[in-house]
């Protein structure tokens, strides 16, 4: 085979890093956490390492427990636009919720990001169930899970129509005839549905990628079926290769059953690596971070995930698994299931569990030499568990620089990862086709 | 007086320029109208000319008559973020509507723009009455004028609370104690009103300017009273010095009556200048643009403004003023009044009127030498009609380069405009105070 299958690598940018105590580590740059230059430099470093994309998560609410952790939000559409200006190739993936935004506004902003970046926009589609976010939008509680996904599905239908509403060749700009835009190729979408009525067309021309790359992270039943239908990349959390492989197999099977190509849906588990020149050094590094954990914070996070108040439990006793309501409302969330699986499999003490989750909120954490990290990446990649990884450095920028400087060259030597970009769009990096406008397609088919 | 009063100059960026046929002029760069580099270069040029700000207008709808004019939209929050990355001093003012957005989302994005630009964000607050925009948001018609302003007023109350919700010193990042944010200084806003219920606090810390500079453009009775209460800069359209002076006097009087300082509300009429090395050359340039006008477009625009279908009227007959309903729904709009005033004052033919409006949609258009343009600016500035201008070049980038190269040096020689920036924030350029957080103020007053 001439073109060997290649890893997709994504940098998940989190202010000070993904370890919950990262900001307390002396080598994070606390003074620059709200400076554009800091994030631009991170993106440039990832671009030097020929990563596919950077990713900014989001939720329209102040995270709980901000007292103890650097969890303020970087609003993705604005920050990624500013980062776009300092980069030329790397993809720019931002989270936005379908539950608390309007499709016309959001479609415009992603189209703008795609235009101004020359075709590098990706949208991580979420339905948001975090904390008190409904209270910021006049609601008393989140819409139910099923209702959120129903709205998300219609939202994508509307946004897709808007992004298609200008055919690619609608903008003529013909000075002689005086026709700027061929209005026969600009389509009012006239959408009327359960959640939205939107007249359209979009207020700007079709963007370089047609529409942003669709990214998704849901692992619940509804999340999987949504992802199988729409997602072109999936951010997912797994603690074991076996668990990741089951998810990978399931999601690809679902996508193929819907008539999609398995290659057009990239499965990218999170990975957080403590890197040392020896195994002992790497573990010591991880332990240094664990010493910075504040149990009050960790327990509050865990309690919110599992619906049990652990604040007065003995840290060195086994987790009181019998208190967890496995049929309750929280049980539908993928992160609930992931944590419960750890408890059932490993019977950890409360202290062991919070350390386990501190590194990357349930994503795969490992400590080792660059070779060992590369081995693990290769193993998941070759054994049907991953098409690549969402790299979640424990701290930034140092933790990412180690990955870029030490792990990436090994992956390249093994022929698993590109030496240079072959494309300038995120679709190009992922090997995804550029979608044709549904209106152009309809015209072609009736012609 | 040692520090002479200084002009404020703002560049109103419009894809090909403000003349409605600008895109047909051979010297506009049609190929780059959607390229970030083009807009960054314009902003850099304005920054070299030490302008206070650039401005992007907006409306969440595809403009009518896109067939004939380069009126696609640049979504301001994304594009200004990307422009921020290529500039260091110039203010970045973007339009956003209070009618079709949610305060929590919009407040986050403006806070982000202010953070990432180091304190250069300005918000042109509009209530939107353009075309079919309600149809993009599930509505059949625009909310009524009064209702839109009532919502806007409450929107500002909510957004203001959100921007104040983190006191300036709430972010501690104290590694030793493990306290990242002092939650006693982060305030849930708990807003409950007629239009919004918002819990707060904002998901990010207070931005460099506290909040964006408030800009407004309303000239109706409600618009003026809103502007007098909130606006720190006003974009306004006037055809004559007298008209501008009346507006200027009225708005300052209203602001002072509300206890504000007259200096903290900058009145900035639009100006579109055709610049030539002689008066004849300048007028020839203007005529060259007028030759490119497409009457079908101009008449459609005029008909929409005045509520009269002029499409079959004789271009060379006087405008049929008797058909205009002066008590109708459109009469409350400032642009309606401005056009009707021209008709009453000058009794133009239809052709004369559409040429008059083609340059800048009703803003002040003049043709002349750089000295003549500078004279006019100085006259308005010194005779109580303007604190500065919103510069609307007929075409871009050339039309702006002429202004920057030829007119700005004259204004500087006359001591009317800065030679270099003394500040790095938009509030600094405008001489506006940085607002204290209302929550910090309350704490101070009860202490």
Image (cartoon, coloured by chain):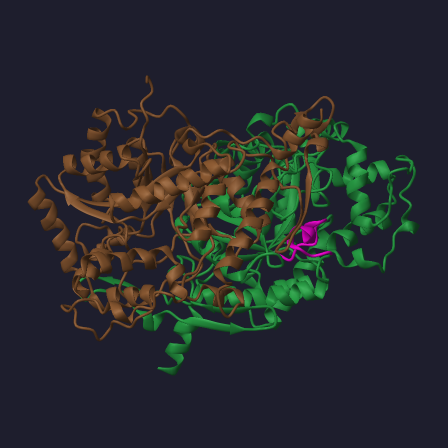
Chain colours: A green, B brown
**Residue B86 shown left or right of residue B19 in the figure:** right
Image quadrant occupied by the N terminus of chain B: top left
* Residue A345 position in % (x across, y down): 84, 49
* Residue B443 position in % (x across, y down): 69, 29
Give the main secondary structure, helix, strand or loop, of the magenta stretch: loop
Residue at image position (18%, 61%) is B347
Asked whether B294 falls inside the magenta stretch, the response is: no
Q: Quadrant of residue A97?
A: bottom right
Depth order, front residue of B95/A276: B95
* Residue A401 position in % (x across, y down): 55, 32
Residue at image position (53%, 40%) is B111
Depth order, front residue of A372/B151: B151
Residue at image position (83%, 50%) is A307
Number of numbered discs present?
0
Task: Give the magenta part as a residue range.
Answer: A126-140
Depth order, front residue of A191/B334: B334
Q: Quadrant of residue B108?
A: top right
Image quadrant occupied by the C terminus of chain B: top right
* Residue A14 position in % (x across, y down): 61, 39
Residue at image position (16%, 57%) is B290
- For the question of whether residue A73 can be seen, the reply is no
Depth order, front residue of B261/A358: B261
Note whether A289 is above or below B221 in the view shown.
above
Q: Quadrant of residue B369?
A: top left
Asked whether A130 falls inside the magenta stretch, the response is: yes
Work out which residue is located at the far bottom of the displayed protein and give it: A446
- For the question of whether residue B407 can be seen, the reply is yes
**Residue B25 shown left or right of residue B64 in the figure:** left
């Amino acid at each position: 085979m001439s073109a060997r299958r290649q890893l997709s690598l994504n940098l998940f940018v989190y202010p000070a890093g993904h370890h919950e105590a990262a900001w307390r580590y002396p080598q994070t740059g606390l003074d620059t956490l709200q400076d554009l230059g800091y994030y631009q430099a991170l993106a440039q470093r990832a671009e030097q390492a020929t990563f596919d994309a950077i990713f900014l998560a989001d939720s329209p609410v102040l995270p709980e427990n901000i007292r103890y952790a650097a969890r303020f939000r970087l609003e993705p559409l604005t920050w990624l636009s500013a980062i776009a200006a300092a980069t030329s190739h790397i993809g720019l993936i931002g989270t936005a919720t379908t539950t608390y935004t309007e499709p016309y506004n959001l479609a415009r902003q992603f189209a703008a990001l795609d235009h101004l970046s020359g075709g590098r926009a990706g949208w991580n589609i979420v339905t948001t169930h975090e904390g008190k976010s409904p209270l910021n939008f006049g609601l008393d509680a989140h819409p139910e899970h099923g209702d959120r996904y129903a709205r998300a599905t219609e939202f994508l239908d509307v946004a897709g129509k808007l992004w298609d509403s200008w055919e690619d060749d609608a903008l003529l700009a013909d000075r002689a005839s005086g026709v700027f835009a061929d209005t026969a190729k600009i389509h009012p979408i006239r959408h009327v549905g359960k959640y939205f009525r939107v007249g359209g067309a979009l207020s700007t021309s079709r963007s370089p990628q047609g529409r942003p790359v669709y990214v998704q992270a849901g692992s619940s039943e509804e999340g999987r079926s949504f992802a199988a239908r729409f997602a072109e990349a999936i951010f997912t959390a797994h603690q074991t290769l076996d668990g990741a492989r089951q998810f990978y197999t399931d999601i690809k099977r679902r996508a193929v059953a819907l008539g999609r190509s398995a290659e057009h849906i990239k499965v990218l588990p999170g990975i957080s690596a403590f890197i040392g020149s020896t195994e002992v050094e790497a573990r010591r590094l991880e332990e240094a971070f664990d010493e910075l954990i504040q149990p009050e914070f960790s327990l509050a996070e865990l309690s919110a995930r599992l619906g049990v108040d652990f604040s007065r439990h003995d840290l060195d006793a086994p987790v009181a698994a019998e208190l967890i309501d496995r049929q309750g409302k929280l049980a539908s969330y993928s992160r609930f299931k992931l944590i419960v699986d750890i408890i059932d499999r490993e019977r950890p003490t409360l202290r062991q569990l919070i350390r386990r989750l501190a590194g990357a909120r349930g994503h795969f954490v490992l400590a080792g030499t660059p070779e060992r990290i590369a081995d693990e990446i290769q193993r998941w990649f070759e054994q049907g568990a991953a098409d690549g990884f969402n790299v979640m450095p424990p701290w930034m920028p140092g933790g990412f620089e180690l990955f870029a400087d030490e792990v990436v060259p090994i992956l390249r030597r093994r022929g698993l990862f590109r030496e240079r970009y072959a494309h300038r769009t995120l679709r190009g990096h992922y090997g995804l086709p550029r979608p044709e406008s549904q209106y152009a397609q309809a015209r072609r088919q009736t012609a």
